[in-house]
Amino acid sequence: MGRRVLRQEAEAVQTLADQLGDSFSEAVEWVLGCTGRVLTCGIGKSGHIARKTAGTLSSTGTPSGFLQAAEAVHGDLGMVTGGDVVILYSHSGETDELVRLFPPLRSIGARTILVTGRPKSSAGRLADLVLETHVGEEACPNNLAPTTSTTVMLALSDALALAVMERRGFSPDDFARFHPSGALGKRLTLTVADVMRPAAEIGRVGPGDSILEVIRTMTEAHVGAACVVEEGLLRGIVSESDLRRHLLKDPGRMDVPAAQIMNSNAATITPDLLAMEALEAFQNYPVKIGEMPVVLEDRLIGLLVLKDLLRSGIV
């Protein structure tokens, strides 16, 4: 049953794609040229599609909102202006709450686009532009529950929003401005500088400091590595793994200088790199590491800790 439903709905979307014509291109131009807002409107399942479409349009650069059909004729039409485009959703095209909206919307001066499975319906005759989403039958075994019809409505709405987005030249930076707190926005905006621990809060030792001093510094800073610094310049890094290898090889030698066991070719990273790119650098490094010194022109300015990166919300 599940496969049949998915195949039937996929075939309906493919048929819609094959039949997409001039009315779709005209709708794109109307939305792109809208001087007000794009308002979406629907009842029931079609209303859910309308509300989702308003969200998609808003997040991709088109000022949008949802107009509740039942409330519209009781005052909410006051939110509509002559510069708006109103997209109404009704599979049958006979939904009373929507049909009665067309005359007042026309008097206001707003353009109307109807998304429907019946272009010759009452709503179809009143709309300024019709986008057809006809389906042969619903995926529902009783051919009653809105399933295939709402799927094609949703697919067409996504196609409209993204076609407008592309024409608008909406960039990843634009997207990030509208999604600053979500994982997607953070992937596009959060940098190493935002996540790293500053130099004053990390473990730092000199090349001549003993292993005992390295361990003390790492413990106080609550990190798994100490950066070896000389006159502000990074000379190397001593990790917990480096300490274990030394102590297994030469137990009891705590007076050995850090320069003797440090990794002078440690992986480093710059503060302007995106946090998501830094995570990829950790993942692609030949050996497993938990820290990377952050440098600017060889000067140590911080330490990027993998666990801090994972807690930053980019994944």
Image (tube, rainbow, N blue to C red):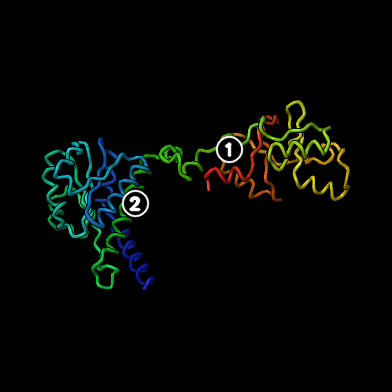
What is the number of the mark on residue 195?
A: 1
From the viewer's perspective, tell me whether residue 32 is left or right of residue 75.
Answer: right
From the viewer's perspective, tell me whether residue 174 is left or right of residue 283.
Answer: left
What is the number of the mark on residue 158?
A: 2
* Residue 24 percent coordinates (x, y): 27, 50
Q: Is residue 116 depicted above or below 298 in this figure?
A: below
Which structural element holds mark 1?
helix
* Residue 252 percent coordinates (x, y): 88, 45
From the viewer's perspective, tell me whether residue 213 is left or right of residue 114.
Answer: right
User: Image quadrant for the N terminus?
Assistant: bottom left
* Residue 15 sits in quarter: bottom left
Q: In whole angstroms, how far apart are the C-alphas of marks 1 and 2? A: 34 Å
Q: Is residue 99 depicted above or below 225 in this figure?
A: below
* Residue 309 sits in quarter: top right
Q: Pick the residue in front: 130 or 292.
A: 292
Which structural element holds mark 2?
helix
